[in-house]
Image (tube, grey):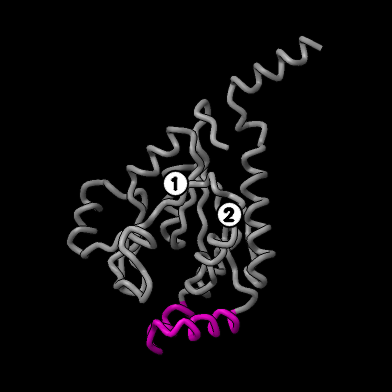
C-alpha cells in the first residue's frame, strides 16, 4: 500500500511493439491494484475496441506538439510515424502523494524518464525470440506489411538495449511473466532505503519496548 510519508516509486515498462506489455500489465493488475497506471497520449488512430482516455489519450498532432512546447510531457517520442508521450502533471501529483506509478512507454521515452526521474525502476519486456514477435505482430492484424517490417527492425534495436534496464521479463508464458513482474514491484517496495522516517522510528520504538 502507498504511504503518504514517502514519495511514490515510478516504474517504467518498455519493450518492442507486439511483445505483450499491455497484456502483461492487465494480467498483473489484480495483484497490484494499488499501482497507479499512467495513461499515455498518442497521435495514432484508435484501434477497434479502444476508448479515448482508457488505453490512451488520443490527440491531434497539433495538440501533441503544443504539449511539447508547453513542457507538459514527462517524455515523448515519435514511433513509426506517430507521437507517443506521458502527460507530466498526473504522474508528478501521484508520486508526490506517495502513490506508485507505472509508465508503459517506448524505449526513447524510457531513456528520457531515466534522465528526469533517476529513481525510476526500469523493466524491459522481451519476447522469447524475434520469430515469436513477428507471429504476434501479424496476428494482431492492425498493421500492413510495411509497418510490420518497420516494427521488426525497430524491435532489433530495442532488444539490443536490454542491458540498460534494471530488470528484464521474458513474456513467453503470460502467467509466469506476470508473477515475475509482480515480484519486481514488491521487491522494490520492500527496499530498506525506501522506508519513510516514520517507519524507522516505529521499528526503533518497538525495539526499545522489548
Closer-to-camera residue (123/24): 24
The structure residue drawn at horizontal position 67% and vertical position 58%, both measured from the top left corner, is 179
Kindly indicate whether the residue at mark 2 contacts the one at mark 1 (C-beta within 8 angstroms): no
Q: Is residue 147 above or below residue 3?
A: below
Q: Which residue is mark 2?
A: 30
- Percent position (x, y) of residue 104? 46, 58
**Over which residues does the magenta segment extend?**
130-153
Q: Quadrant of the C terminus?
A: top right
Q: Quadrant of residue 25?
A: bottom right
On the image, the x and y values in percent for residue 140 come to 46, 81
**Left or right: where 61 falls relative to 185:** left
Compared with residue 112, is residue 118 higher up or lower down, i.e. above or below? above
**Alpha carbons under labels 1 and 2: distance apart:** 30 Å
Element assignment for label 1: helix
Element type at marker 2?
Answer: helix
Estimate the x, y position of residue 118 in percent, counting from the top left.
49, 42
Within 10 angstroms of label 1, few (less than 14), some, or many (20 or more) residues? few
Q: Where residue 26 appears, x then y in whole percent?
A: 53, 61
Q: Is residue 26 magenta?
A: no
Q: Observer-nearest residue: 47 or 11?
A: 47
Q: Between disc 1 and disc 2, whose residue precedes?
A: 2
- Answer above or below: position of 7 versus 73: above
Q: Which mark is residue 115?
A: 1
Q: Is residue 204 left or right of residue 14?
A: right
Residue 151 covered by magenta stretch: yes
Q: Quadrant of the N terminus?
A: top right
In this view of the protein, which residue sits in the foreground, 70 or 144? 144
Task: Out of 74 and 102, give the one closest to the viewer.
Answer: 102
Amino acid at each position: 500500500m502507498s504511504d503518504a510519508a514517502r514519495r511514490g516509486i515510478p516504474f517504467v515498462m518498455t519493450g518492442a511493439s507486439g511483445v505483450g506489455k499491455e497484456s502483461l500489465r492487465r494480467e498483473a493488475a489484480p495483484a497490484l491494484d494499488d499501482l497507479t497506471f499512467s495513461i499515455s497520449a498518442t497521435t495514432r488512430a484508435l484501434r477497434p475496441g479502444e476508448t479515448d482516455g482508457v488505453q490512451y489519450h488520443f490527440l491531434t498532432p497539433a495538440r501533441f506538439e503544443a504539449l511539447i512546447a508547453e513542457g507538459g510531457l514527462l517524455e515523448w517520442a515519435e514511433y513509426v510515424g506517430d507521437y507517443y508521450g506521458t502527460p507530466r502533471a498526473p504522474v508528478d501529483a501521484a508520486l508526490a502523494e506517495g502513490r506508485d506509478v507505472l509508465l508503459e512507454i517506448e524505449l526513447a521515452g524510457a531513456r528520457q524518464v531515466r534522465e528526469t526521474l533517476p529513481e525510476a525502476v526500469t523493466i524491459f519486456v522481451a519476447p522469447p525470440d524475434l520469430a515469436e514477435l513477428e507471429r504476434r505482430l501479424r496476428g494482431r492484424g492492425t498493421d500492413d506489411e510495411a509497418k510490420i517490417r518497420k516494427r521488426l527492425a525497430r524491435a532489433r534495436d530495442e532488444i539490443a538495449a536490454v542491458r540498460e534496464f534494471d530488470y528484464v521479463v521474458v513474456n513467453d508464458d503470460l502467467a509466469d511473466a506476470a508473477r515475475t513482474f509482480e515480484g519486481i514491484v514488491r521487491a522494490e517496495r520492500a527496499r530498506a532505503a525506501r522506508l519513510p522516517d516514520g517507519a524507522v522510528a516505529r521499528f526503533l520504538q518497538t525495539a526499545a519496548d522489548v
